[in-house]
Amino acid sequence: MQQKRNIQIIEWEDLDKRKFYSFGVFMTMTIRATVYPATLIRTRLQVQRGKSLYSGTFDAFFKILRSEGVRGLYRGFMVNTFTLISGQAYITTYELVRKYVSQYSEDNTVKSLVAGGSASLVAQSITVPIDVVSQQLMMQGQGEHLSRFRLNSTEAGKSKKVFGQTRNIMAQIFAADGLRGFYRGYVASLLTYIPNSAVWWPFYHFYAEQLSKLAPSDCPHLVLQAMAGPLAAATASTVTNPMDVVRARVQVEGRTSVIETFRQLIREEGCWGLTKGLSARIISSTPTAIVMVVGYETLKKLSLRPELVDSRHW
């Protein structure tokens, strides 16, 4: 006999899809705007050699702020907003695969692991070209000497021309590498984000369940889920950070071999090189996880089919 779960999980068939997608776009945009500066800092830390530019996360934050202003922390943000498409694809794939796997297994860990990995595969196929461009834009300014492509002086100063800098970088990538250049680091991204997503969801449900056993019976489920999210994010970030460092270098520096990039990283910086950007990643993943979990679980509750609203206890 299956043990009754303390925390109810809203499944795909319980949702009003129109509400789900409408609220989902707003939620995804809010999350990306909140954590983008930490993502930019993480990228620069991972690409730099040793501590040639920044000594750490907070040093990078203050140096960028002083040298480039607030706009410097949002370099490449406009093109990155196109990942809203991949965000919706991720959510849809995750929920549909969970529903499909539930026909063969009621084990929530199995459903979360398979659905999380599948969702990441679909999302990364859309995200990688956007990431390649946005990461090149992130490296402009103080980090431009670490990038293969640089904005010319006239483009770097332009702010009126819509996506002028983005088009400039895209033209350089295409001229150098053709269409394949926009999928540089695709394998490294899959090796980073499929395990990350496959680890995150099972640990999220695991931590939520463990916290529910420790918390008072009247503690709102949303509070427990908001605590479980950052714990799962920190776990997944720690496990997958070595591959994330390799991914960033492959995409920004134009490398072709994941294995050779990994070997060179170990050769030049030792095992500590695999932890580069980890603190920035955890710092960015913590608010991301809180906002995502609170937003996502609230989104699902708001998107419940009307006839199910009164039947659920939170």
Image (cartoon, helix red, strand yellow):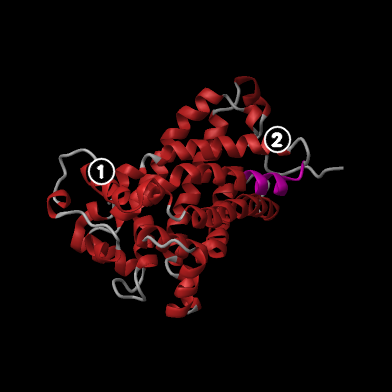
Mark closer to the chain start, 2 or 1: 2
Q: Secondary structure at mark 1?
A: helix
Mark 1 residue crowding within 10 angstroms, few (<14) / some (14–19) / many (20+): some
Q: Is residue 89 above or below residue 209?
A: above
Report how far apart the C-alphas of labels 2 and 1 lie in the structure: 41 Å
Question: What residue is disc 2 on?
Answer: 100
Q: Is residue 114 magenta?
A: yes
Q: Is residue 290 above or below residue 310?
A: below
Residue at the far top in the pictured view: 307
Residue at 52% over, 67% down: 259
Q: Which region of the structure is painted magenta? A: 106-115
Residue at the far right in the pictured view: 1
Q: Tell me the kind of residue under disc 2.
A: Tyr
Question: What residue is disc 1 on?
Answer: 167
Q: Tell me the kind of residue under disc 1.
A: Arg
Residue at 23% over, 57% down: 150
